[in-house]
Image (tube, rainbow, N blue to C red):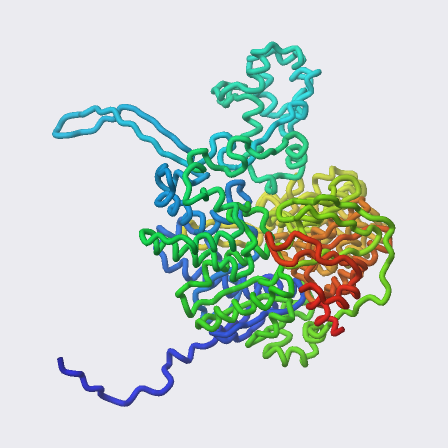
């Protein structure tokens, strides 16, 4: 073969293709961004900083990542796009140089009762294949080891054409699944307290059923009253055995009620299907209260909580069955898999080994595969999502992280930093929204947004290196070197809360006395047992207000006013001042604009194309019908009040003719947690993670209690906002409250009156008290990881 001769001029040293080394953003106006323009270097680690609500997520997630995903979706056929979520183009003039974006955010994993760490990753699927190949005795395919697959069988006649004749044959089939038939793969069974479902001294017509949604003459109650199975005027305690069975346990049957076809079934299975099969965290508050009161959940007696059938548990590799494997700490499971020498499944073992080692590498080796996904913190969920990307062969993609150090002890932050650098060094662009100074320090490029939050933010205050940020004089730059000093004098306790023999999860029969009337900080590496001690061992009930990391729920119709209950006193004040019904002043009720149904926007679905949102032309985005806006209170209509920021509204409702003490108290709590810039009517869907956490905290501050339990309240907080939080905690303690905080932030540790440190490690290497005392004693001893890091932080 002859070699073709190169003709013409030689190629230039720099190819044109190599010049596309920037992501260019010009004229971004998403949410509070104020027409900003920046250039982000590719194949570098860029950290976005700024106070919570300054526009970081709007720029990184809602502009850059969203447009990347939208453009990728457009490469599919129109038919395929019809099955994908529709994404509108972000409000930006130019977005250039984008690469494929992979988003690793803080969104909690699905809290479905059957979702676990194993099912959320590939680890469980591979274990099932492993046991179906090597398990003795052999019981079937991988489905036989899955608690999401039920065993079913059936038989019947089938007809088909063969040679011009219709042939009938009898066929049968069976599928062997691993789902425990008693608990249906949930691991727990529920018992219902019948006394909470009905009052047996009353008849149905007298309102005997007390279940939410079954009172007040609605369709649910009419179904039972008009079923004809029993006398609706007879007290339930006088029912015959058959009538009581028909009322409580009757199998489903079709019937007509008031001319409408409906399905009747006993009250117990109806409640189980409509309420108990759903994620408890997704229920409306009054439904959740009812379920807590009426239902007790206990470990399934048939499968002992493993979720699996007896057959699935009988098949073993050596002495280990799949339930044992899933219950192991992942670091121990990795060692067990490493010890298997089976050439027939060598590729499977290698891949499974890699996944399990990735858990340990990312600092989650203390978890087990049977851990319910809904119990993971936001930081744990985000790190699990990272696992699939660590060994990926993809390069030249954009990884987008949302505060990846959340929930990490200072000891573990360096490990996370190494992983971010590892992704960058493979030739990827890494964009990180972060407040942690240690992560900001490793950035190749820093973008600081601000100067404030909400309407006071949305501009680029600084672009450049971390050293340049420190010298820039911006809010972030000034606080980057902040170091809290140890307290010279700590408060004395007013008593103790005794915990004896705590053994929840990995706790090792812990005995501890938690001082009351002071600020107590519980520390330790991730997985050491902090939340188990505080949430599972501190007796809940009267006087204990617990603020955990659970996500707040709300649609684009929800806003700070509705979530905190602020809208109720405002509506009543408007109604009283104008002599009309309070429902008029709710955008979800009588006062809603009929054109947009109170949403303020009109959403047009364009099938496989991106949907279009436009401000409602009738109400001009105010959400209320024009007649409602004619009613005023304190010189403002309801839409003007909802457009106010918290600080302005606090002044408005604090004095003068608009004085409303109930509203003023709620607004004061919102201002206390640093949300003074939020508009009362801003949709919850537009709030950042830090804003949602503080909104939740503000709501709980209104509850009456003597002991406040807070789980990592600095989540999503800028360095400057931590001072405000510490001042709030001090006010609570000075008011006679006891505050117990689970926290990794060294500034909060240094400010504590008493520290309880758990460890020394995570999982079965933790669960013990390794230190109790003042922060000064912890630093002086330097006997634990926390002590060493706190000493380095305070410079003592």
Front in this rendered view, residue 483 or 49: 483
Image location (x, y in percent) of residue 314? 43, 36
Q: Residue at x 54, y 58 (%)?
A: 383
Quick check: 16 above or below 91?
A: below
Q: Residue at x 56, y 11 (%)?
A: 242
Give residue 192's quadrant in the image: top right
Q: Is residue 796 visible?
A: yes
Image location (x, y in percent) of residue 569? 77, 44
Front in this rendered view, residue 399 or 230: 399
Q: Residue at x 66, y 69 (%)?
A: 450
Image location (x, y in percent) of residue 244? 59, 15
Quick check: 753 above or below 313?
A: below
State left or right for residue 711 relative to residue 307.
Answer: right
State left or right for residue 380 relative to residue 16.
Answer: right
Q: Is residue 455 visible?
A: no
Q: How many marks?
A: 0
């Amino acid at each position: 073969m002859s070699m073709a001769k190169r003709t013409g001029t030689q190629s230039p040293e720099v190819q044109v293709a190599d010049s596309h080394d920037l992501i260019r953003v010009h004229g971004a106006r998403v949410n509070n961004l104020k027409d900003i323009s920046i250039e982000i270097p590719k194949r570098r680690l860029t950290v976005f900083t700024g106070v919570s609500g300054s526009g970081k997520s709007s720029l990184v997630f809602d502009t850059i990542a969203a447009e990347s995903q939208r453009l990728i979706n457009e490469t599919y056929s129109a038919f395929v796009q019809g099955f994908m979520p529709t994404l509108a183009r972000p409000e930006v003039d130019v977005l250039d140089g984008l690469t494929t974006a992979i988003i690793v955010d803080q969104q909690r994993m699905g809290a479905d009762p059957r979702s676990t760490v194993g099912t959320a990753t590939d680890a469980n699927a591979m274990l099932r294949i492993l046991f179906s190949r090597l398990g003795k005795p052999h019981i079937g395919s991988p489905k036989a080891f899955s608690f999401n697959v039920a065993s079913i069988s059936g038989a019947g006649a089938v007809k088909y054409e063969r040679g011009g004749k219709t042939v009938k044959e009898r066929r049968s089939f069976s599928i062997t699944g691993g789902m425990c038939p008693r608990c249906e793969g949930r691991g727990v069974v529920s018992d219902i307290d019948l006394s909470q479902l009905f009052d047996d001294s009353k008849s149905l017509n007298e309102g005997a059923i007390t279940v939410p949604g079954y009172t007040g003459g609605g369709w649910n109650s009419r179904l039972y009253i008009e079923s004809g199975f029993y006398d609706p005027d007879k007290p339930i305690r006088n029912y015959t055995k058959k009538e009581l069975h028909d009322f409580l346990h009757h199998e489903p049957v079709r019937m007509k009620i008031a001319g409408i076809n409906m399905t009747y079934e006993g009250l117990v299975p109806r409640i189980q299907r409509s309420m108990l099969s759903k994620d408890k965290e997704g229920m409306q508050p009054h439904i959740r209260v009812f379920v807590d009161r009426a239902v007790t959940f206990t470990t399934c007696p048939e499968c002992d909580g493993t979720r699996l059938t007896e057959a699935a548990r009988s098949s073993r590799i050596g002495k280990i069955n799949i339930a044992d494997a899933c219950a192991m700490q992942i670091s121990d499971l990795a060692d067990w898999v490493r010890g298997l020498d089976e050439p027939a499944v060598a590729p499977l073992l290698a891949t499974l080994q890699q996944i399990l080692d990735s858990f340990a590498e990312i600092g989650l080796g203390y978890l087990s595969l049977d851990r319910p996904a809904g119990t993971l913190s936001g930081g744990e969920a985000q790190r699990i999502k990272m696992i699939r990307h660590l060994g990926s062969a993809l390069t030249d993609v954009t990884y987008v992280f949302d505060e990846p150090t959340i929930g990490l002890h200072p000891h573990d932050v360096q490990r996370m930093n190494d992983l971010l650098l590892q992704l960058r060094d493979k030739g990827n662009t890494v964009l990180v929204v972060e407040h942690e100074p240690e992560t900001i320090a490793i950035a190749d490029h820093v973008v600081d947004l601000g100067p404030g939050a909400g309407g006071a933010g949305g501009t680029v205050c600084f672009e450049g290196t971390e050293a340049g940020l420190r010298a820039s004089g911006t809010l972030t730059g000034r606080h980057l070197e902040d170091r809290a000093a140890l307290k010279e004098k700590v408060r004395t306790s007013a008593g103790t809360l005794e915990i004896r023999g705590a053994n929840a999860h990995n706790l090792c029969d812990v005995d501890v006395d938690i001082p009351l009337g002071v600020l107590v900080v519980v520390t330790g590496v991730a997985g050491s047992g902090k939340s188990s001690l505080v949430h599972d061992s501190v007796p809940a009930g009267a006087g204990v207000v617990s603020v955990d990391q659970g996500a707040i729920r709300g649609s684009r119709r929800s806003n700070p006013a509705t979530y905190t209950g602020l809208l109720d006193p405002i509506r009543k004040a408007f109604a009283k001042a104008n002599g009309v019904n309070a429902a008029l002043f709710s955008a979800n009720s009588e006062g809603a604009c009929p054109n947009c149904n109170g949403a303020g926007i009109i959403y047009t679905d364009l099938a496989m194309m991106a949907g279009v949102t436009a401000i409602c032309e009738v109400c001009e985005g105010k959400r209320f019908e024009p007649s409602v806006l004619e009613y005023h209170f304190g010189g403002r209509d309801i839409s003007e009040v909802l457009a106010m920021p918290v600080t302005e509204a606090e002044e408005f409702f604090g004095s003068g003719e608009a004085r409303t003490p109930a509203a003023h108290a709620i607004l004061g709590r919102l201002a206390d947690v640093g949300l003074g810039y939020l508009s009362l009517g801003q949709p919850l869907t537009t709030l950042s993670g830090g804003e949602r956490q503080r909104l939740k905290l503000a709501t709980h501050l209104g509850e009456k209690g003597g002991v406040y339990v807070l789980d990592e309240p600095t989540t999503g907080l800028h360095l400057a906002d931590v001072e405000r939080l510490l001042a709030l905690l001090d006010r609570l303690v000075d008011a006679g409250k006891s505050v117990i905080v689970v926290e990794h932030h060294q500034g909060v540790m240094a400010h504590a009156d008493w520290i309880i440190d758990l460890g020394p490690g995570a999982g079965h290497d933790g669960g013990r008290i390794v230190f109790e005392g003042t922060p000064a004693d912890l630093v002086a001893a330097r006997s634990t990881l926390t002590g060493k890091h706190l000493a380095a932080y305070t410079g003592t």
